[in-house]
Image (tube, rainbow, N blue to C red):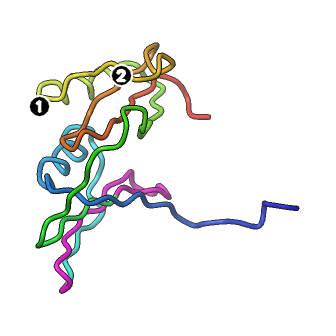
Amino acid sequence: MEFNDFSAAQIRIARPTDKFDEVIDFYEQGLGLERLTDFANPDGYTGVILGLPNAGYHLEFTKHADGSPCPAPTEDNLLVFYIPEKSKIDHVANRLHSMGYPGVLPENDYWKERRVTIEDPDGWRIVLMNTKGI
């Protein structure tokens, strides 16, 4: 059986949050992602799409007028950013730390060396990894 028949032009990870403004600030001002667009619709949803310019992947954060509960997953559910320049990782990690988001110990020891793990306002974890992506 062949599995190479799937293709996609874009990937978006979408997630609700009750800490909408804090989460947007974390990813936009702290991490440095660009606001690509935002939206509001009559069904009560408001959202922001963040990402890197000209990249085929985005993060979408939404809130609903009636609330958007979003319990964090386990400590080993990670969003990993591969960043080759250690100085850029240090810069972003220091900026996030100054905003009140210090590094945390990862669940899996693999993520300790050459990496920084940080929790966003909802408790979801990102990893800033000092190596080229695979």
Residue located at (11% from left, 29% from top): 100
Picture layout, residue 69 above or below residue 112: below
Magenta-span inclusion, residue 131: no
Q: Which mark is residue 116?
A: 2
Residue located at (19% from left, 63% from top): 68
The amino acid type of the residue labelled 2 equals Val
Q: Quadrant of the N terminus?
A: bottom right
* Residue 11 x, y percent position in the rendering: 50, 60
Residue located at (46% from left, 13% from top): 113
Name the residue that disc number 1 marks: 99
Is residue 7 rendered to the left or right of residue 132? right
- Front in this rendered view, residue 53 or 133: 133
Picture layout, residue 116 above or below residue 121: above
Picture layout, residue 85 above or below residue 51: above
Magenta-span inclusion, residue 56: yes
Which SS class for mark 1?
Answer: loop
